[in-house]
Image: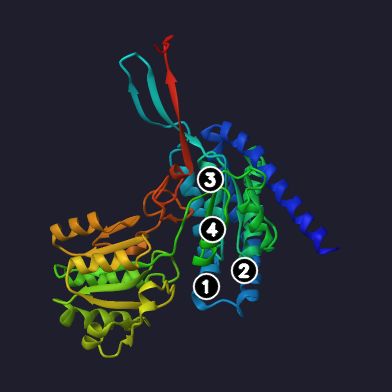
Amino acid sequence: MTAAALTLTLEAHMLAIGRAARAAADTVRKASPETRTQAILAMARHIRRQAPQILAANARDLDAARTRLTGPELDRLALNVARLEGVAEGVEAVAAIPDPVGEVTERWTRPNGLDFARVRTPIGVIAVIYESRPNVTADAAALTLRAGNAVILRGGSECLQTSLALHAAIVDGLQEAGLPAGAVCMVQTADRDAVGLMLAGLDGAIDLLIPRGGKSLVARVQKDARVAVLGHLEGLNHVYVHSGADPEKARAVVVNSKMRRVSVCGAAETLLIDAEIAPVLLPVLAADLSALGCVMRGDEQARAVVASMEVATVEDWTTEYLAPIIAVRVVDGLNEAVEHIRLHGSGHTDSIVTDDAAAADVFTREVDSAIVLVNASTQFADGGEFGFGAEIGIATDKLHARGPVGAQQLTSFKYVVRGTGQVRP
């Protein structure tokens, strides 16, 4: 087959996916909340039933990826029995949250008697492009269905076999509940041209596109997409240890923020600490992190306190390591910490550790990130921890949705206006 014929075949395949998703979106929107709930629960049951096939597919993906991916990237890709059970439990958690479709978020009456209601409504067809995170396949399927949408999924080449196996289980769950397979469509090729076709909108089939992956993927989507995009930038997250911090709280928050799981987007990448407390507390924090295998790269003041640190470069302040590495800077108070975050952060997640309520208030007011924490780990940047059941990603845009993107954030709204025969003079 010629290259031109192959291109036509891929384009035809992708347009067929778009048509299937668009047709299914109408059915899903009209389905009752109970039907959507039963479909999500059935998806979880089939993920468990098909665990051997899913884990076998994941093993094939891992074997193929070992020569190309680093340790943290392999960790994001890897599934085991416990992690797959966590995927199924995450789907069940989405089934348990209230169905947002039809929820009245605001209502008022005008002097002329007109009754106005703002009502949540599905967006329609959502496309999700993601990299080596197979759990996104299940999370995105459950969340979009909960919000009354259809979804087109395009996973990374590294997790293609895993995603296809998960998708097979998801489709079985949909069909068991009487919903069309097109409600969750999966691009079944690693051909990068498929992404370009999605960015073009599949002949109007796609209403919203969500990229979840590295900086280059998000940049390409935001540059080339001809449909609306919900942005998810890298997690250049900071923990700032203020002079008013309780030392034990600081130790717990810093270590957990960095080392609980280094490969997630909520992991801390930079530690900021006040000069006033650095001589006493920074060596303790360094010992805690070093004991867990974390490499520290410090500025001149940090290295004056802990000489074993590597030298931090300018690039370290803007690097999402997703690895056991953390940049360390000693700052001269709250204002300098906030300014550092403003200059180098990605607007994802930032935390302050302090018992000074006034300092905490300034930090939460002036740090303009999607998630701002006080005395808590940055690893709480997760839709499940927010009570959303799961998430598709952490939106760093400032329009439509911001922070963890759960079912509510995957709806739009319409105004329903009821009258008694009013006409406008």
The residue carrying pointer 3 sits among few (fewer than 14), some (14 to 19) or many (20 or more) residues within 10 Å by Cα, namely: many
Instruction: Tell me whether circle 3 and circle 4 mark residues in contact (CB < 8 Å).
Output: no
Judged by depth in the image, the label closer to the viewer, 4 or 1, is 4
* Among numbered discs 2 and 1, the one appearing first in the sequence: 1
Q: Residue furthest bottom?
A: 307
Residue, disc 4: 223
* Among numbered discs 2 and 3, the one appearing first in the sequence: 3
* Among numbered discs 3 and 1, the one appearing first in the sequence: 1
Residue, disc 1: 73
Judged by depth in the image, the label closer to the viewer, 3 or 4, is 4
Q: CA distance from mark 3 to mark 4?
A: 25 Å
Residue, disc 3: 144
Above-or-below relation of 321 to 384: below
| Picture coordinates of residue 295, whole percent (x, y) | 36, 83
- Decide if residue 158 is on the left or right side of residue 244: right
Residue, disc 2: 158
